[in-house]
């Protein structure tokens, strides 16, 4: 199983340690189950960095941005600032997960509605 194609981009100020890469990979791989059969073909673009502006704003110093695109029109995007890079990753992961769950519910509801309409059409 190859899984989702994760492409990571880091700004100059971020030293991509293996710990950050492993943490990011673990958090984003958990989203694959929401993509279902589309997970193999999905592309996830991630950008990590330090926020521009005042250097002493430690509350929102780091940012993480995630954009997922998958076949079937599935798309999710989130960007967040936090005090640590891990907190920023957690925040965007939760937002993207919420968007994917909503999209999945819409797809299932639409499929059920189409099934009901077909059933009623066959019964005449």
Image (cartoon, rainbow, N blue to C red):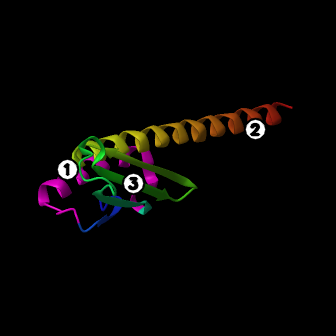
Image position, residue 59 (x, y; %): 27, 40
Q: Is residue 27 magenta?
A: yes
Which numbered marker is on residue 56? none
Residues under labels 1 and 2: Cα distance?
A: 46 Å
Element at badge 2?
Answer: helix
For disc 2, the neighbor class at 10 Å (few under 14, some 14 to 19, many from 20) is few
- Mark earlier in primary sequence (3, 1): 1
Q: Name the residue that disc number 1 marks.
A: 23
Helix, strand or loop for the magenta stretch, by majority: helix
Q: Name the residue that disc number 2 marks.
A: 118
Residue 57 falls left or right of residue 105: left
Residues 92 and 1: in front is 92
Q: Name the residue that disc number 3 marks.
A: 66
List the single residue furthest toward the right. 124
Magenta region: which residues? 13-40
- Mark earlier in primary sequence (2, 3): 3
- Mark earlier in primary sequence (1, 2): 1
Residues under labels 2 and 3: Cα distance?
A: 38 Å
Element at badge 1?
Answer: helix
Q: Is residue 18 magenta?
A: yes
Residues 32 and 85: in front is 85
Element at badge 3?
Answer: strand
Residue 89 falls left or right of residue 95: left
């Amino acid at each position: 199983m190859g899984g989702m194609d994760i492409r990571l981009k880091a700004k100059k100020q971020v030293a991509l340690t293996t710990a950050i890469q492993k943490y990011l990979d673990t958090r984003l791989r958990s989203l694959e189950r929401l993509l279902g059969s589309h997970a193999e073909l999905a592309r996830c673009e991630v950008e990590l960095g330090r926020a521009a502006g005042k250097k002493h704003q430690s509350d929102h110093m780091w940012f993480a941005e995630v954009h997922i695109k998958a076949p079937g029109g599935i798309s999710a995007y989130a960007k967040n600032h936090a005090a640590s890079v891990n907190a920023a990753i957690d925040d965007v992961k939760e937002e993207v997960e919420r968007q994917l769950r909503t999209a999945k519910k819409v797809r299932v509801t639409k499929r059920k509605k189409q099934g009901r309409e077909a059933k009623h059409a066959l019964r005449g």
